[in-house]
Amino acid sequence: MPKKRSGGGLTTTQQAAKFLGVAALSGAVLAGIALPAAGALGLAAKGTVEGFDEIPSNLKTPPLSQRTTILDRDGGAIATVYSRDRTVVPLKDISPYMQDAIIAIEDSRFYEHGAVDLKGILRAMNRNVQTGGTAQGASTLTQQYVKNVFVEEAGDDQEKVAQATQQTIGRKVRELKYAIQVEEELGKKKILENYLNITFFGQQAYGVEAASQRYFSKRAKDLKLEEAALLAGIVQSPTRYDPVNDTEEATKRRNTVLARMAATRAITQAEADKAMETPIKLKVSKPKNGCITAVSGSGFFCDYVRKTILTDPAFGETEEERSKLWNLGGLTIRTTLDPRAQQAANQAATARVNKDDKFAASVVQVQPGSGKILSMGQSRPYGLDQKQNETVLNLSVSNRMGGSTYGFQVGSTFKPFTAAAALEKGIGPETSFSTDWKITLQEKDFRNCSGSPAGFAEWPLQNELESETGSWDMTSALGKSINTYFALLEQKAGLCETVEMAKKLGYERGDGKKIVEAPSITLGSEVSTPLSMAAAYAGFANRGTYCTPIAIESITDPNGKKLKVPQSKCSRAMSEKTADTINQMLKGVVEDGTGTQAGLSDRDNAGKTGTTNDRKDAWFVGYTPNLSTAVWVGDDIGEKSSMFNVTIGGQYYPKVCGGCLPGPIWKIAMTGALDASETPSFNPVSVPRAKEKEDKEKGDGDREGGRGGDGDREDGKPGRDRTPGGQLPPGLIGGPGGG
């Protein structure tokens, strides 16, 4: 190996390359790209040594793209994702056979020459002159490494890849210059290590560790002689010598490598002969890449983590920076996913809704006080095979994070926001209103946040059943979901105050647009997402403090350095007394209101049902002091269908309601996720009541209206929509292609 001069001057090889002059350099270049030697004349006439020196001397060696591992909160693996399947390992963890094999077949004089192999150049030039063609090249292992660095730097940009591999003199001159620098700065052992980690071995495997796992399902340090020779032979042409698809051609190439190893005395001839007689024995491991391989139905959560890194400024100011971080990989991402909660959510989502049903279910869980997303489950599996009813549409989240175009109308699950706004304004829970089952209000009597009338049309609305005529206070109106009551309560509390309360609890549209400040918002006319609703109700559970949802606990890079991750931001949305009061009133919903089928018998729990116009969306959002869960059921493809006289999960429903399908799903998810030994209670508070008229309603189901509070008649048939502006447009949800 050439030695450095004292004072950090040029190595012997560098001096030789320089003092041989342009003609010799031309020969090196042309031999390196396997062109006829006669082509040297053109470069010799135009080039100079000074021009060679002008090439930048700093070779930027990019970090190598590697696997990223996504873990749950307990450290269990959820999925492995990568743009290039690679695991970087030190030279000591690579079999000596592998090291000897790659040197023997690619650059047998690797330890004898510098960056440029002058003897090899002369040999190649002589051979090419004799044949008058491109019989032989003379690129050293160092030069090949430099070229691979350029290719790695190009990433998936095909134009840059072409530039990095084009057979031109200009590229070869630059490659030579950088090779000299690499030899000077890294040394032989490090160059060999880097080469074995960067090189492509076919079958989507980059680097010898990934290749060893792919073909033999073992570590690179455990490779046998014949296995190492096989991998070394693949490098020259990964497609031609692919042992998976052409064993015969791969065997011939392997034996060529073994012969070279014997010729260079890396092994004895006897060892080579024995290895040649050994048939190729593969133990192929299929690559498991991406969220499609996530465990316990956590593919949607996995994809949410990916979207978080690609969209959150914490991971880069620009989209390009964030994409580069993700594609480079090598990250270890510990998430907030609770394996127990995820299993429960997945079980719940599929327990009452089949994957091939027309309608789908979504379940998402958030921890009060921390904002940690504990689970995301859906009735349709995560994937791209539509014939298997798979989807990548995450029904729990916003469009920006991979969800539906707009989100879903939330129905009466919005009513607790109105109640909280009223309590904050000093309107007591004993406040009562007496109404007929059907009323008409004036939009001009509601003021938006700019102080203007919310409109100038009439707003007709009604309760679910004609029998729902009488007087209610806030507790009974929440329990029975009385539309007329909440329209009047919103008018008294203020439309703007109601909207602002929802915003404080993190309520937002699925399309990210501004919330429409219409009076019908109190009945759930606006769209949102299950994640937004679960996080909002977690604010009630947390005694009035809302925390933004997060999915990532920590991230470390390939060097073990911790990266900054988004933190949950907690802020007070209402007083503790207001939250305590809401909690007590919503307990009534699951005890003797519309959510009795969801109620948990072994702990404090509260929640709210929601069913929208024509029963196109059905909800149950509820919580305990330590867990908030939102469940949505509806049509997830194309134009939304009503859920009347439908069979879902093998069960017939004359009409789907929030309490009769999402409610039981919620109960399954909560029961499975919660630890029986931990049963915290809501803070007890006295809730004043008003004297009420006896309610004559004896029917079943939710008593909730939709866009305009028109609701559903007692016979189960949809009522007329009298809402100004009408229904949301057909095909409200769904991403590109309606899905």
Image (tube, rainbow, N blue to C red):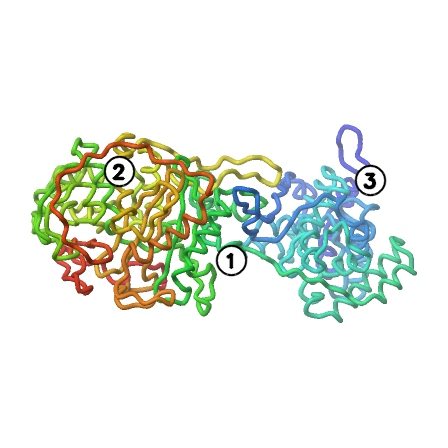
Kind of residue at badge 1: Ile
Residue 728, placed above or below residue 115: below
The N terminus: image quadrant: top right
Q: Which residue is drawn at 68% across and 52% down?
A: 207
Dividing the picture into quadrants, the one containing residue 701 is: bottom left
Position of residue 138 measured from the top left corner of the image (x, y, whole percent) = 76, 55
| Among numbered discs 1 and 2, the one appearing first in the sequence | 1
Q: Provide the residue designation for mark 1.
A: 292
**Residue 44 visible at all:** no
Kind of residue at badge 2: Ile
Report the Cα–Cα distance between label 2 and label 3. 80 Å
The image's mark for residue 328 is none
Report the Cα–Cα distance between label 1 and label 2. 40 Å
Q: Which residue is drawn at 45% across and 63% down?
A: 390
Residue 662, placed above or below residue 476: below
Kind of residue at badge 3: Pro
Helix, strand or loop at disc 1?
Answer: helix
Q: Provide the residue designation for mark 3.
A: 2
Helix, strand or loop at disc 3?
Answer: loop
Looking at the image, which is closer to me, 624 or 209? 624
Instruction: Name the mark nearer the viewer: 1 or 2.
Output: 2
Q: Provide the residue designation for mark 2.
A: 582
Residue at the top extreme of this rendering: 7
Looking at the image, which is closer to me, 418 or 587? 587
Q: Is residue 441 left or right of residue 500?
A: left
Crowdedness near tag 3: few (<14), some (14–19) or many (≥20) residues, C-alpha within 10 Å: some
Report the Cα–Cα distance between label 3 and label 1. 51 Å
**Residue 595 visible at all:** yes
